């Protein structure tokens, strides 16, 4: 009798190399049912978008018309870069004829983009920031794409997409793609946070870090201190505390995805508070803060406006902004404590007057 074949040396490496994103989603859900297949396909499409953007970024300096500004302004009043437009269109193209996504809403589009041919069956909406940290693009420093998937509620017959104006707890999946020294895709479908690294030789995202947990505390605080004099006193108190205590270090890349990625793995806190010029801060709730808040909570960390959990905030419009404090539980709580203390002092002072 011939013995059954026993793989020995390569079993672990091959098993890891075969853990692609779509397989991982199915494993997580322990199902081959329609919902699991949908999510697996959606993640596969997002991965394709990530590969297309990564390919263009990797050669942008050699291509005519890939870098620089378009001369247009987006709905946020910010100058649009050619790479913003390209990446925005990549996501639209990828989901055309997917049969799954009826609406896409992004930082670069005033109104949601409808794919009518998908709408009879497409129950999902993709919210995304195609290029996060676009100021980094022209100088070849890390940028990212952020995404969230929500289930469409109702028919949206008037095209107002008002069902999107609900809390981040309605997200069924969220994540980002980091275009760094290697391209990584980090995602959650509500069962932990997992990272995949693009293996260029295979053209596939392969599982590299499973069930990532943010340390409860970390040394990094990540904030644009150029805005110091525009912040409320509570945030300034926190920064002064950082300056005066050992064990803290500042890191700020100008791309939220990169800064958050560091904190996800090493702990610490990222802040984009409200300021005199921007009372709600800069970051948009639906496709920047809420997706990363979903990941932070799934990784055992926290995300807050400073006074409320980000995932509980209900946006009043598609492009609503909100202050963001995100990262390790202890570090987010420390920022909140300075905000609360100042607010308590102000309440007391008002009562005395
Ligand atoms: P963008 O999506 O238009 O690039 O804007 C978001 C970016 C974040 O990635 C980053 O954290 C922040 O803006 C940086 O802003 P600032 O230059 O004000 O510090
Ligand atoms: Mg952004």
Image (tube, rainbow, N blue to C red):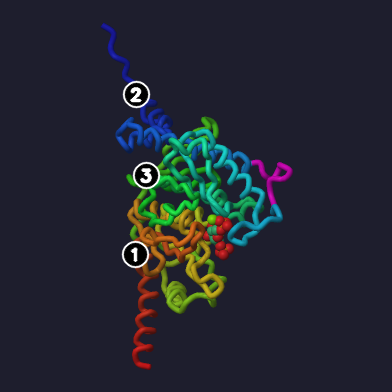
Mark 2 neighbour density, 10 Å: few (under 14) some (14–19) many (20 or more): few
Q: Nearer the viewer, residue 296 or 87?
A: 87
Q: Earlier in the sequence, mark 2 or mark 3?
A: 2
Residue 131 horizontal/vertical position (percent): 57, 50
- The answer to whether the residue bearing label 3 lies less than 8 angstroms from the nearest atom of ligand 2 is no
Q: What element does badge 3 sit on?
A: loop
Image quadrant of ligand 1 equals bottom right
Q: CA distance from mark 2 to mark 3?
A: 33 Å
Q: What element does badge 2 sit on?
A: loop
Q: Nearer the viewer, residue 258 or 134?
A: 134
Whether label 2 touches label 1, CB < 8 Å: no
Residue at the far top in the pictured view:
1
- The answer to whether the residue bearing label 1 lies less than 8 angstroms from the nearest atom of ligand 1 is no
Residue 8: numbered disc: 2
Residue 149 horizontal/vertical position (percent): 43, 46
Q: Name the residue at 49% across, 36% down.
A: 118
Q: Nearer the viewer, residue 108 or 331?
A: 108
Is 245 placed above or below 111 here? below
Which mark's residue is nearer the viewer, 2 or 1? 1
Q: Earlier in the sequence, mark 1 or mark 3?
A: 3
Residue 318: numbered disc: none
């Amino acid at each position: 009798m011939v013995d059954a074949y026993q793989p020995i040396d390569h079993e672990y490496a091959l098993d890891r190399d075969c853990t692609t994103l779509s397989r991982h989603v199915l494993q997580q859900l322990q199902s081959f049912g329609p919902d699991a297949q949908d999510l697996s396909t959606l993640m596969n499409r997002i991965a394709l978008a990530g590969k297309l953007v990564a390919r263009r970024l990797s050669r942008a300096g050699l291509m005519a018309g890939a870098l620089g500004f378009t001369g247009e302004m987006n709905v946020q009043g910010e100058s649009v870069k050619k790479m913003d437009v390209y990446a925005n269109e990549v996501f639209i193209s990828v989901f055309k004829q997917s049969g799954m996504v009826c609406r896409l809403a992004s930082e670069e589009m005033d109104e949601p983009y409808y794919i009518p041919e998908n709408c009879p069956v497409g129950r999902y909406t993709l919210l995304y920031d195609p290029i996060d940290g676009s100021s980094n693009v022209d100088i070849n420093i890390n940028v990212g794409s952020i995404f969230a998937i929500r289930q469409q509620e109702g028919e949206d017959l008037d095209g107002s997409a008002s069902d999107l104006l609900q809390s981040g707890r309605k997200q069924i999946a969220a994540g980002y793609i980091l275009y760094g020294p290697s391209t990584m895709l980090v995602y959650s479908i509500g069962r932990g946070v997992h990272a995949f690294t693009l293996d260029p030789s295979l053209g596939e995202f392969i599982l590299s870090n499973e069930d990532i947990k943010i340390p409860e505390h970390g040394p990094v605080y990540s904030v644009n201190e150029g805005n110091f004099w525009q912040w409320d006193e509570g945030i300034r108190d926190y920064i002064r505390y950082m300056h005066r205590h050992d064990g803290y270090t500042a890191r700020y890349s100008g791309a939220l995805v990169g800064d958050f990625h560091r904190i996800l793995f090493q702990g610490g806190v990222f802040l984009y508070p409200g300021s005199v010029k921007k009372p709600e801060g800069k970051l948009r709730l639906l496709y920047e803060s809420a997706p990363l808040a979903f990941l932070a909570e799934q990784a055992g960390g926290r995300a807050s406006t400073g006074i409320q959990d980000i995932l509980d905030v209900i946006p009043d419009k598609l492009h609503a902004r909100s202050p963001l404090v995100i990262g390790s539980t202890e570090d987010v709580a420390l920022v909140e404590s300075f905000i609360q203390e100042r607010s308590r002092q102000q309440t007391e002072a008002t009562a005395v007057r």
